[in-house]
Amino acid sequence: MDLIVYLQIAFVSFIINIVPAFMPPTWLVLSISKVNYPSLNTFAIAAFGVLGSLTGRYVMYYYSKFLGKYIKEGHKKNVYYFRKLVGSNNVAVFLMTLIYSLGPVPSNFLFISFGLSEIKLLPVLLGFSIGRFVSYVLLIDVSFQAFSYLSLFVNVNGARIIADILGIFFAVIIVFVKWEKLYLFIEKLKVKKANKNRI
């Protein structure tokens, strides 16, 4: 019985995370599952939630690459320099994804942005898995202790809208920020530092 519920949790998490926007937060669905089935293990719920979320975001990462052809050339240039700035540093990508995933903010636009940038997927998946597992465990436990099923359900719309706005804001930063200027500035600093070391 429990295994069936865990598999259902993974499936629902997958569906939620394959859709680009306006879906309930995964942690909320996991918390409701804990409220409905108190005997379920919190760590197991989080693990199956991560499994479904990871698979969904994996699919999203790849289909978001096809969205690139619909982006204006100027924005493509910004995305290109964003990739040059952080994409070659696997540790930076891992830490960025890990820190982002520790919070309750949806990762849909994060994966869409990374997909458009064609950043290497492995450090993204590792950071996402660890960050989401930790955040899911904490959020499930806190939600189970603090709220009833009704209060969680009533608050979902407001929380979802705020979270989606934050996610869109992150994606806008990646697409519209002039990463070329920042990249060239950092490269100039590297050249100056190298010249000083030669003296």
Image: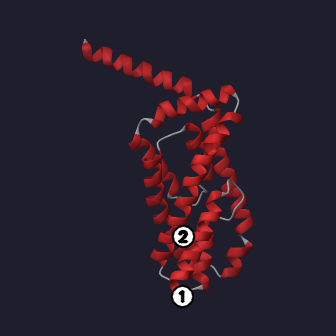
- The relative height of residue 137 versus residue 68 in the rendered view (above or below) is below
- Residue 1's label in the rendered image is 1
Q: Nearer the viewer, mark 2 or mark 1?
A: 1
Residue 30 against residue 193 in the figure, above or below? below
Which amino acid, mark 1? Answer: Met
The answer to which image quadrant residue 190 occupies is top left
Give coordinates of residue 52: x percent, y percent. Answer: 55, 65
The spot of residue 33 in percent (x, y) is 60, 79
- In this orientation, does residue 95 appear? no
| Relative side of 196 to 113, left or right | left
Q: Residue at x 56, y 70 (%)?
A: 10
For residue 37, side relative to residue 125 (left or right): right
For label 1, the crowd category at 10 Å Cα-Cα, with few meaning under 14, some 14 to 19 and many 20 or more, is few
Q: How many marks?
A: 2
Image location of residue 194, percent across then percent down: 31, 18
What's the residue at 67%, 40% (across, down)?
Answer: 67
Q: Is residue 17 visible?
A: yes
Judging by the rendered image, the residue that carries numbered circle 2 is 139
